[in-house]
Image: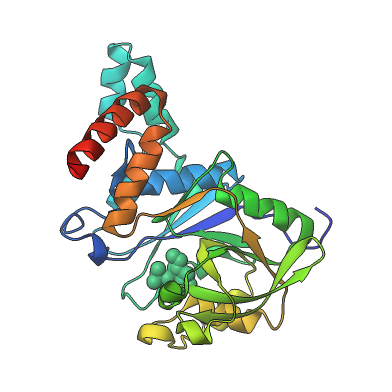
Amino acid sequence: MTHPYKKVRKAVLPVAGLGTRLLPATKVMPKEMLTIVDRPLIQMAIEEALQAGIEEFIFVVSDGKEILLRHFEEPKAMMEMLESRGKTKEIDKVKASTLSHDSVKTAYQKKALGLGHAVWCAKDLVGDEPFAVILPDDTVRHTESCLAQMMHIYDAHGGNIIASCRVLPQDTTRYGMLAIEKDNDAVRINGLVEKPKPEDAPSDMGIFGRYILQPEIFAHLERHEKGAGGEIQLTDAMAHLVKEQPFYACEFKGERLDCGNDIGFVKAQIAYALDKDNLAADLIEYMTAKLKEYKA
Ligand code: G1P
């Protein structure tokens, strides 16, 4: 690294939300436990972070969502059974989704006051160092994880990095939108607005659910300023910090899939299943037949 900023070792996972867009599936089951083919969304987020070199995971949960933490513990009885039966493939799968006790930390968000508030709840566990934020229902399908791609920009420039993607005019009210400017090999962010009307959006670049932030963001989150939708918005705190520190956009490579709503969730199932050698041929045959049936 050629800049004075510290290494990013921690990731915050704001997973306290109720997942109402996916009801009734989320009545009991946290949306982050819903699986895309064979992995829960929360596991995909952790694997993405591990690929980017993250060492510590801070889950911001609400009451009843502790199952998300349990997913990463070693299931002792199951392991004993698998070992006694010599099920090595299954053992590997369990191990791949187990995190060491020391690397997992928990913060509670007692009231659903917004994404900015959720991140603020992790303040003491983050401390005085930069950190990543991953929203698990936004996934990116690519050989190199989205956060790993963002780390390259961080290594080169430091500061704060936001994953960004093009947003259609009719969708600006669902995203944080960015004012950007080309700066040699980088894209600088000069301003941010949460969920503006299309005519108020500063560009067609929106915020995707991945961030690398400096700890100074907490001073702005601390004010608990209410923004769009009456919520404490992370975007508003970043709009203050951008006046003090550099922010860069990462136009990441890969297909973005929003698993926070039903159509995005279905598309993700298909896309990730097609990536699997043992499923692709069957699925293509099935979909081809279905398409014919649908057209008829
Ligand atoms: C949040 C952020 C928004 C961002 C979006 C990406 O909104 O507030 O800036 O564009 O995630 O998914 P939410 O989807 O939680 O309403």
**Which residue is rendered at x = 36% and y = 87% of the image?**
230
Q: How many marks?
A: 0
Q: Judge left or right: residue 182 versus residue 20.
A: right
Quarter of the image containing the C terminus?
top left
Q: Judge left or right: residue 223 versus residue 291.
A: right
Q: Is residue 121 visible?
A: no
Colouring style: rainbow
Q: Quadrant of residue 130?
A: bottom right
Q: Is residue 81 visible?
A: yes
Residue 266 place in picture, x, y as percent: 29, 48
Residue 295 place in picture, x, y as percent: 21, 43
Q: Judge left or right: residue 43 versus residue 159.
A: left
Residue 185 place in picture, x, y as percent: 79, 60
Q: Quadrant of ligand 1?
A: bottom left
**Which residue is rendered at x = 57% and y = 55% of the image?**
10
**Which residue is rendered at x = 54% and y = 65% of the image?**
166
Q: Would you place residue 195 above or below residue 11 in this image?
A: below
Q: Is 213 or 282 nearer to us in this picture?
A: 282
Question: Residue furthest toward the front?
Answer: 296
**Which residue is rendered at x = 31% and y = 76% of the image?**
111
Q: Would you place residue 32 above or below residue 226 in this image?
A: above
Q: Quadrant of residue 71?
A: top left
Residue 284 place in picture, x, y as percent: 33, 30
Q: Would you place residue 258 above or below residue 268 in this image?
A: below
Q: Would you place residue 107 above or below residue 69 in this image?
A: below
